[in-house]
Image (spheres, rainbow, N blue to C red):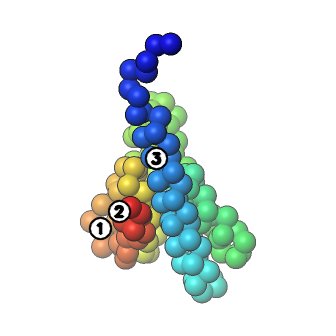
Amino acid sequence: MVPPRHPNATAMVEKERASQQRVFELIRSDVVRFMLALPEGVTIVSGGANGVDALAASLARQRRFTLVEHLPRPEEHGGRFGPAAYARNQLIVDDAEDLYAWPSPWGRGTWDTIARARRKGKLREVFEPWVRVK
């Protein structure tokens, strides 16, 4: 049997996967509490991504909130997803009166949206429940 080139890789991947799952559970719990506390008549602006966007959209539909979803449109950006995602982030900020964000420690898109909202004076709060994960 040939020894693995990186004997600890599997354990590290599994640990990261477990950490990511725990982070999403914390974020999910925060988002659900936040959404349930919102008054009737709220409009939710979402980017249509997996994770928080999808959860918020689902909860918005359940609560019969108005939902505005801005999906990235790569076809408008030479078929490239990156520029389309950043353009989508700007649409989110432009359409929202306030921005509340739950970024993951692994992603960049939400941080871009946070920076854009901060520049426009629309950032209200950044929730980072994952800092509690050890």
Q: Position of residue 4 (x, y in %)?
A: 43, 21
How far is disc 2 from disc 1 in space, using C-alphas? 6 Å
Residue underneath mark 1: 118
N-term-proximal mark, 2 vs 3? 3
Q: Amino acid at mark 2?
A: Ile
Q: Nearer the viewer, mark 2 or mark 3?
A: 3
Q: Nearer the viewer, residue 15 or 129?
A: 15
Q: Position of residue 6 (x, y in %)?
A: 38, 26
Q: Quadrant of residue 65?
A: bottom right
What residue is drawn where x is 48% and y is 30%?
A: 79
What residue is drawn where x is 51% and y is 59%?
A: 22
Q: Are the residues flagged by discs 2 and 1 in contact, CB closer than 8 Å?
A: yes
Regarding residue 130, the answer to whether it shows in the image is yes
Q: Nearer the viewer, mark 1 or mark 3?
A: 3
What residue is drawn where x is 38% and y is 61%?
A: 134
How far is disc 1 from disc 3 in space, using C-alphas? 33 Å
Residue underneath mark 3: 15
